Image (cartoon, rainbow, N blue to C red):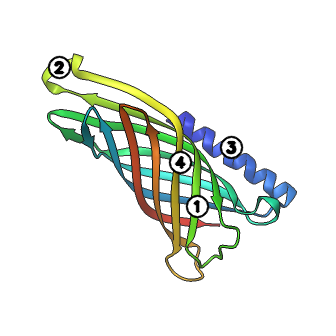
Amino acid sequence: MCKRLALIVSALGGITSLGAQAEIPLTFHVSGQAVYTKVKAAGESFSPSLFQFKGGMEFTDGILDGIGLQGLVAVPITDAEENGLTLEIKQQSAAYITLTNPETGPDDLKVSILLGYASTEIETQLPSLGDSGSNKDTFSDFSYGISLQDPIIEGKPFYWTLDYIRYYKDDNLSVDGLSLGVTYAF
């Protein structure tokens, strides 16, 4: 997880220094969010909780106006248990291209579409089977979602953020997240 976080931070740092040197009009934001996660597998539903750290940047002028990049890393808060099986999301990371209406003002409700790639590491334990009842696997694939941001106080750079993201989906497993938090834009 530290490698993924370092990669995301260094990529955003590289873009920041490039923007400063070329005077490209960019805005940056960071946020922390509590995430309600819904994992559906083998006919069961699990709801472990996560805390998510996000960072991103967005172009604010020119041909790329409204297009941005966003990275996130999530860590577990709680696990979930159903019928004696415990499921925990050990870590989650993702990178997205964000698409936002360029006409959105700083005090307007901001709606962004997220398109990218996510990786989720899930650990399951069935205590009745002892050590052989434990399994850890990573699921990675195309990910998409929607993000809403609304100012907390007019004229200040703090925003309420509500995200819905589909992190993973195949025939046997789906991982979705609904997160609420606070974003600081600079």
Name the residue beneath numbered marker 2. 130
Quarter of image, res 24: bottom right
Mark with earlier residue (2, 3)? 3
Mark with earlier residue (2, 4)? 2
Is 22 positioned to the left or the right of 75 in the image? right
Badges 1 and 4: C-beta atoms under 8 Å apart? no
* Distance (Cα) linking label 2 and label 3: 42 Å
Mark with earlier residue (1, 4)? 1
Amino acid type assigned to the residue bearing label 1 in the image = Ser
Decide: few, some or many residues near mark 2? Use Cα within 10 Å; few <14, some 14-19, many ≥20. few
Badges 2 and 3: C-beta atoms under 8 Å apart? no
Name the residue beneath numbered marker 3. 11
Task: Give the number of the disc on residue 144.
Answer: 4
Decide: few, some or many residues near mark 1? Use Cα within 10 Å; few <14, some 14-19, many ≥20. many
Name the residue beneath numbered marker 1. 112
Is 168 positioned to the left or the right of 14 in the image? left
Decide: few, some or many residues near mark 4? Use Cα within 10 Å; few <14, some 14-19, many ≥20. many
Amino acid type assigned to the residue bearing label 2 in the image = Gly
Q: Secondary structure at mark 1?
A: strand
* Residue 113, horizontal then vertical, whole percent: 58, 57
* Distance (Cα) linking label 1 and label 2: 45 Å
